[in-house]
Every structure is written in C-alpha cells, then in structure tokens.
Image: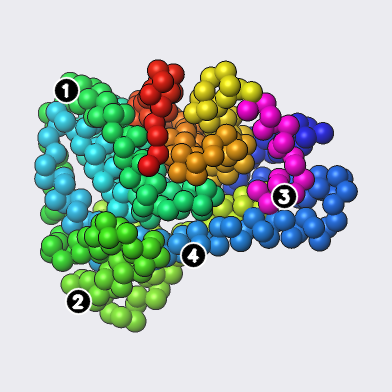
Amino acid sequence: MELATLGLFAAMLLVCVVLEKSVLWALAAGFVLFFAYGLRKGFTAREMLDSAVSGVKTIKNILICLTMIGMLTALWRAAGTIPVIVSWAAAAIQPQIFLLMTFLLNAMVSVLTGTAFGTAATMGVICSTMAAGMGLDMALVGGAVLSGVFFGDRCSPVSTSALLVAELTGTAVLKNIRNMLRSAAVPTLAACVVFFLLGRGSTSGAVPDLAALFSRGFRLHWAAALPAAAILVLSACKASTRCTLGASILMALGVCVWLQNIPPAELPGLVLRGYHSADPEIAAMMNGGGVISMVKVCSIVMISSTYSGMFQKTGLLNGVQSRIGALAGRIGTFGAYAATSVVAGMIACNQTLAIMLVQQLCGKLRSHAGQAAIDLEDSAVVIAGLVPWSIAGAVPLASVGAPTKSMLFACFLYFLPLWRMITEKCGRGFSAK
C-alpha cells in the first residue's frame, strides 16, 4: 500500500509536468492523498491535521525569511545594487573567457541574492544576451549559468535551500556554509578549468556595454553596493539570517530614496509587487522581485512541509528507509544520499520537496547533524537541478533561453556529488566541522 501511494503521487507530479501545469496542483493533491492514507491506517482526521501543522511549524522561520528575500530582491534592483555590481563585473569580461566569467558572475550574484531563479532572471539573462551577440553556443552558456546559479543557491546566507536544510537538520546556516565552501573547493576549481577550456574557442564578438545601458535608469555609484556589503559583513560577523536580511533591506530603502531618488510613497508598492522599469531594455533584464514573487515558492514550501509531519505520523516511508539503510552499507552513506536524491528529484519535480524527502529518508544515516546538512547540500540541493522535468533546473534555463541539453554541461552540479562519492570510496570522506 505504501509503494502504491508513493507511486500515485509520483504519477500526479509527472502529469502536471507533461501538461505544463503548476506543480502546486500535484502537491495539493498529494496532501489529500497522504491525508487519506493516514485515515486508512486508522488515524483520526484531527491527528492528521495536527501532524500536518507540526510540519509547517518546523519551517515558519523559513517562510519569514522567504518574505524578506522577496522584499530584498525588489529593493536591490531598484537601489541599483545588482546593476552596479554587474556593470563592474562585466567590464572584466573577455570573449575568450566568457564561459568561465559566466559561471563566476552567476555564482557571485547567486551568493548575494540566494536564489537560483532570481539570478538566472538577472545575471543569467544578461550573460545570455551577451552570448547571443557573440554567437556562442547557448547549450554551453546555459550549462555555465546553471552551474553558477546553483553555486550560490547552495551556499548563500540568504538562500532558501540553505535555510531549509539548516531548519530540517537543526544546524546553523553560517556554520553549514563554511562546510559547504570546504567540500566544494575542488569541484569549483574543476568547473572553472572546464569552462575555461570550453571557452577558448569562443568567437571574438564584442561584449555589450552594460554600464551605459544601466546608467539610463540608475545612478551607478559605489554606494549602491552597500546593501550587498551589509550581507557579507553581517554574515561574517555571524549575525542571524533575519537580522542580516533586515539590515540589508533598511540600507536598500535608504539607497533607493537618497541615491536613486525614488519617492518614499512608491516604496510599499515596489516592495510588494517588485521592480519594474519603464525602459524596455532594462526591464528585460531587471524586472522582478517583490513579496508577491515569493507567494508560489512559499506555497510549495508550506504544502511540502505538511508531508514531513504526516510521513512521521503514519510511517509511510519506514519501509523505504530500511532499504536505503541497506544501500548505504553497499555504496557508502553519501552514495545513498546521492542515489536517493536522484529518485527524489525525479519524483518531486522541485528542489524543496526533494530536500525534504531525502532528509526524511536518509536523516537517520548520520548521527552528526552538521554532516547530515552537508550531505543534503552536496546531493539533493544540486542534483535537483539536473532533472529535465524539475522546475529546479528547467526554470533557470527557460529564463535564459537555453536548451535542456545545457544540463549536460552544468559540470559543477556533477562534479560536487561525484567528488564526494570518490573521496568517500577512497576512505577520505568529507568530515563536517
């Protein structure tokens, strides 16, 4: 009965993907399905509702942070924070190292913003626009963008996935990030080498003057970068995530008024609905953000979180957990995490639910919470971006206009779990501090 229930849920997700419907429909149907399973197992409706609510309570801080991130992504656009940083970085781009710079620039912006989708819609679009002007292969560009956006989505102090992993494992985000940087050092260097070699045959087309473009809508003053600096400084000082986000939001509000001359009366609408430029060229690259932009993400996280409570109550995943334990004995603990992440990513079709499923199934394999956190980050978080029908990778590629085969060139997403499996197999597995 357990396998039939999970199989039906997977089928509902796949139907939504095939019909190009929102995954929220399948998640809502999944809630009804798992609720009915609990009733069939003899639990009362009240018990099932309580278990669902308990799951939501575990991620209440994440929902608050998601709302603040929505505010921040709008304000960083309006304040000129992203435009000024991108303009500085674009000045260093040379056609021969364009793929490498695409990876690094998207990694940088995703670390600052903490969102793969938001980075792809801003820096990713900018890079793809420049690539089209230089006649580069969009499959290669898409692979570099996908690698870059997931670098920061994994290890940014304002990343929703990093916050989720920390909440699920009961660990500190900043401590996890230090571990993530250590485990990703070799895969990141390897990805840089690959993108450098792939880009050596690039065309010599001109790089667009982004500073001139953005100067039409923003004052490109160094002060515009202060909200991003606040994130870096407060993160280094080990301030709480909400404190860090709040400080950056307040600073961005000041920059909007003082530097960009935005009337204070317009700020509430900007924060709610996101940034919108009257310049069509700037709008194509910069429009977005705002609290409303996070509603769908919050809904996915909230519905998915109800599953964890119901799974624990009904023991739906107990049989699968025992099989994964046996698998870990054969291929290693991280190997079991990676294998489970592949299946979870294919079934869940989104990163949030994939992370929750892997933690539910593999969490007992590790007694050290920090080790469990880094295993999740190096498996479920990045592998979700390699599933063609998952929104985790499909949305960023669609944003930049790159083909699905770009996933073949998203080498950082392959190198990281492979490196972890190789080192574990050689008896030198990564140890979280």
Q: Residue at x 82, y 33 (%)?
A: 1
Q: Which residue is mark 1?
A: 200
Mark sitting earlier along the chain (1/2): 1
Q: Which residue is mark 3?
A: 310
For the residue marked with disc 1, what is the amino acid? Arg
Horizontal arrangement in the rendering, residue 19 relative to residue 37 (left or right) = left
Instruction: From the top left corner, tell me how far across and down residue 264 is, in percent.
Output: 30, 80
Label 2 – label 4 distance at C-alpha: 27 Å
Q: Is residue 385 above or below residue 48?
A: above
Helix or strand or loop: what does disc 2 sit on?
helix
Q: Residue at x 36, y 67 (%)?
A: 243
Q: Which residue is mark 4?
A: 64
Q: Which contiguous range is marked in magenta?
A: 308-325
Q: Residue at x 65, y 39 (%)?
A: 13
Label 1 – label 4 distance at C-alpha: 44 Å
Mark sitting earlier along the chain (1/3): 1
Q: Is residue 67 above or below residue 158?
A: below
Instruction: Please name which of the two marks, 1 or 3, marks the residue nearer to the observer.
Output: 3
User: Does 320 lie within the magenta span?
Assistant: yes
